[in-house]
Amino acid sequence: LWLLAVHRPGAGDKRQQRGRQQHRVEEEPRRVVDLAHRHHPVKLEAEELKRVEAEKLKALEEERLSIQKESELMAQLAEKQRQAELEIARAEADAKEKAETEARRLAMEEEERQKLIEALKTVYDPEIPVDIYELGLIYGINEEINNNIKVTMTLTAPGCPVAEEMPKWVEDAIKQVDGVNDVIVEMVFDPPWDMSLMSDEARLTLNMFCLLYTSDAADE
């Protein structure tokens, strides 16, 4: 029976067919593995390209952030410089304004002082043809509060005949200046007066006076 089954027509073909099917089943995993091996370099190349592209993108992003940070830093520096320039400009403007204000104040003080000096030049020692300012009898002119004026002066000698009248003359002369409220005249004898305190104009006038006086005395 076995021999009949073996040698039965078509039985060999069936065995061969089953053998081929089994061979295909056994070969299929190897074929899949071979295909995987054949396509594996392509996959690796694609992954490498992705990695390279990712690194490039990362490098570009880092560069962009660096440029952005540098730009922000430059903007901050520019703003600080602008603020510093504004501060310098304001300081210069304030200094200029203060200087101009001080100059105007000094000019006004000088103008007022000149008015006071001109008033003092109207006062003379009766015995000397020179006003008390050029004579050097005025030691100080100070403006006090409320437009009060203090004059510090001396006389050519403590025993001057007009020692009592002279302060009143000075007070009356100063009060003639516009804006003056009150006048205080202080008489001092320290330091004592001497001829070195006279102005050149006073010396010249006194020299001429002495020459005229000497000439008149000689004629008599």
Image: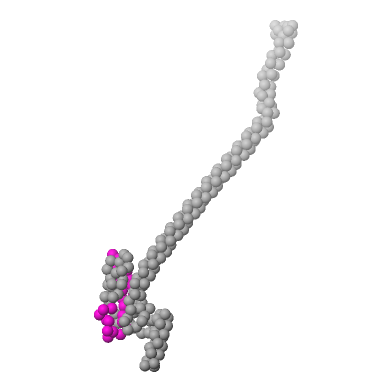
Which of the 4 image quarters holds residue 2?
Answer: top right
Residue at (38, 84) in percent of width and height: 195
Left or right for 165, reference 44: left
Query: Is 96 a magenta residue?
Result: no
Residue at (62, 36) in percent of width and height: 53
The boundaries of the magenta stretch are 140-166
- Colouring used for the render: one colour
Quick check: can you spot residue 145?
no
Rendering coords of residue 48 (x, y %): 64, 35
Above or below, 175 against 31 in this view is below
Quadrant location, the C terminus: bottom left
Rendering coords of residue 54 (x, y %): 60, 37
For this orientation, the residue located farthest to the front is 220
Quadrant location, the N terminus: top right
Residue at (28, 73) in percent of width and height: 171
Quick check: can you spot residue 83?
yes
Q: Nearer the viewer, residue 129 or 179?
A: 129
Left or right for 161, reference 24: left
Rendering coords of residue 144 (x, y %): 30, 68
Query: Is 151 a magenta residue?
Result: yes
Q: Nearer the viewer, residue 101 or 150?
A: 150
Which of the 4 image quarters holds residue 203?
Answer: bottom left
For this orientation, the residue located farthest to the left is 164
Residue at (28, 75) in percent of width and height: 169
Above or below, 109 against 13 in this view is below
Which of the 4 image quarters holds residue 148?
Answer: bottom left
